Image (cartoon, rainbow, N blue to C red):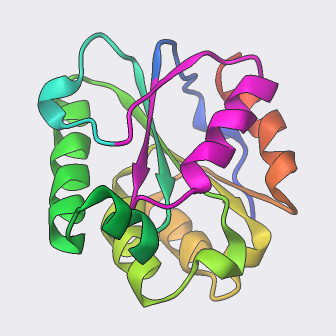
Amino acid sequence: MSVSLSLFGANFELPIILTSAGQSADVQMVQVLLQRANLEATFDNSITAEGLNDEKTLILAIGGSSKGLGAAGIRIEDELDRVSKLIQMAKEKDMKIIGMHVGGSARRGELSDRFINGIIEEVDYLIVVEDGNKDQVFTNVSNEKNIPLDIVPRITSSVEPLQKAFE
C-alpha cells in the first residue's frame, strides 16, 4: 500500500544533502536519480552531525555493504552511530529526512537490515523499490508510524516521487 505525498501535505525543500546509511553503492544510484529529477544535491558519504549546515533535506540511501564499509575503513557500529547522530541533528535543525532503499532484494540481509531497522522509523518519507519490500518491513513501519511511502517497481521509477516531493 502506498501513501500519497499529497496526503502527507509537506513538501521537501532545497538544499539537499545526500549520504549513505551503510556505505553501499546504492548512494551513487540515488545520486543519478536526483540528477534525472533535476534536483541538485551535495553528496558526502561520511558527513557527520557537525557537518550539517543550512540544508533543508537529508536523503539517506539505506543499504549496508561489508565491501563498502571495509573500503572506507568503517566498522558497522561506527556507521550506525554516525547515521543515528546525523538523524538526531537533522531533526534538531528541523530538516526533513527522506529514506531511500533502492537496492531491492540484493541489498537486503542481516547487514542492511541493521541499517533499515535503525533508520526507517525516523524518516519523514520513504521511497522503496518493490523487490526490497518482500517481507513488508517498509509497509509495516509506514503504517505503524504514519510515514508516507512510495513503493516503485524499479529503481528508475524513483525519479517521479522525488520530483513530486520537491514540487
In the rendered image, the quadrant that contains the N terminus is bottom right
Whether residue 146 sits left or right of residue 89 in the image: it is right
Segment colored magenta: 17-45
Q: What residue lies at 41% left-to-right and 58% top-to-bottom? A: 23
Rendered view: 110 above or below 46:
below
> Percent position (x, y) of residue 64?
44, 70
> Percent position (x, y) of residue 132?
68, 75
Q: What residue lies at 80% left-to-right and 37% top-to-bottom? A: 159
Using the rendered image of the protein, determine whether residue 97 is visible from the camera's viewpoint.
Answer: yes
Q: What residue lies at 24% left-to-right and 62% top-to-bottom? A: 73
Rendered view: 123 above or below 48:
below
Rendered view: 21 above or below 136:
above
- Frontmost residue, 99 versus 10: 99
Q: What residue lies at 40% left-to-right and 76% top-to-bottom? A: 66
Using the rendered image of the protein, determine whether residue 65 is visible from the camera's viewpoint.
Answer: no
> Percent position (x, y) of residue 139?
61, 71
| Membership of 19 in magenta stretch | yes
| Membership of 54 in magenta stretch | no
Whether residue 111 sits left or right of residue 7 in the image: it is left
Rendered view: 13 above or below 76:
above
- Frontmost residue, 34 versus 124: 34
